[in-house]
């Protein structure tokens, strides 16, 4: 059996494993998925629906674990040894691979503005981020979103749904 390690437990990694399972009729592959978030993959495109009442379970893409798939959540890949063909995780787990897929997704850009790392400043990428935003909104009246792109406007709407007056700061003229 060949070993596939997928670093990243987001939508792309999840879809890859689903497609491989559907096509691997000879059961040639064993897959190990490593994701640093504390939950299995979920629909990030619908993340804003969390503020309209959708639960984390509603957003879940389902658990891939099964006879030929191991999913490790809350586990960060820290090293790839291409010579030995292994992935090492923060817990010290060493995962051998025949094939490796990096499906780590994106990292939100946080402008280097003084105070960006203070309590109450958040990014808008994960369910845990949304939980932190919700907690910070308690007792607040106003929120500011830096960035007026799609996610920025969704974040502003989330603040509005949390009962805050939302302000958007955007570099572009429109």
Image: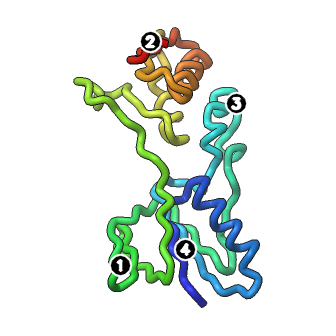
- Quarter of the image for residue 144 reads top left
Q: Earlier in the sequence, mark 2 or mark 3?
A: 3
In the picture of the structure, the residue carrying the numbered disc 3 is 53
Q: Depth check: give the residue in front, 171 or 157.
A: 171
Relative vertical location of residue 91 with respect to residue 112 in this rendering, above or below: below
Q: Nearer the viewer, mark 3 or mark 1?
A: 1
Q: Earlier in the sequence, mark 3 or mark 1?
A: 3
- Packing grade of label 3 (10 A; few <14, some 14-19, many >=20) is few
- Packing grade of label 2 (10 A; few <14, some 14-19, many >=20) is few
Q: Nearer the viewer, mark 4 or mark 3?
A: 4
Residue sitting at x 74%, y 75%: 23
- Quarter of the image for residue 71 reads bottom right
Q: CA distance from mark 1 to mark 2?
A: 46 Å
Q: Depth check: give the residue in front, 57 or 173.
A: 173
Mark 3 element type: loop
**Which residue is at the far front?**
173
Residue 45, x across and y down, in percent: 63, 40
Q: CA distance from mark 4 to mark 3?
A: 32 Å
In the picture of the structure, the residue carrying the numbered disc 4 is 32
In the picture of the structure, the residue carrying the numbered disc 1 is 82
């Amino acid at each position: 059996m060949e070993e596939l390690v997928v670093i990243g437990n987001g939508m792309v990694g999840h879809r890859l494993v689903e497609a491989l399972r559907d096509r691997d009729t000879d059961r040639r592959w064993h897959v190990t998925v490593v994701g640093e978030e504390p939950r299995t993959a979920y629909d990030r495109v619908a993340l804003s629906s969390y503020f309209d009442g959708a639960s984390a379970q509603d957003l879940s893409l389902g658990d891939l674990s099964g006879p030929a798939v191991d999913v490790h959540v809350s586990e960060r890949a820290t090293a790839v040894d291409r010579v030995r063909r292994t992935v090492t995780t923060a817990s010290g787990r060493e995962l051998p691979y025949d094939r490796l897929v990096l499906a780590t997704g994106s990292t939100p850009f946080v402008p280097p503005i003084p105070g960006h790392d203070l309590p109450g400043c958040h990014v808008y990428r994960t369910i845990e981020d949304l939980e932190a935003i919700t907690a910070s909104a308690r007792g607040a009246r106003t929120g500011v979103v830096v960035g007026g792109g799609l996610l920025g406007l969704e974040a502003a709407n989330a603040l509005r749904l949390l009962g805050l007056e939302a302000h958007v700061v955007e570099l572009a003229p429109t």
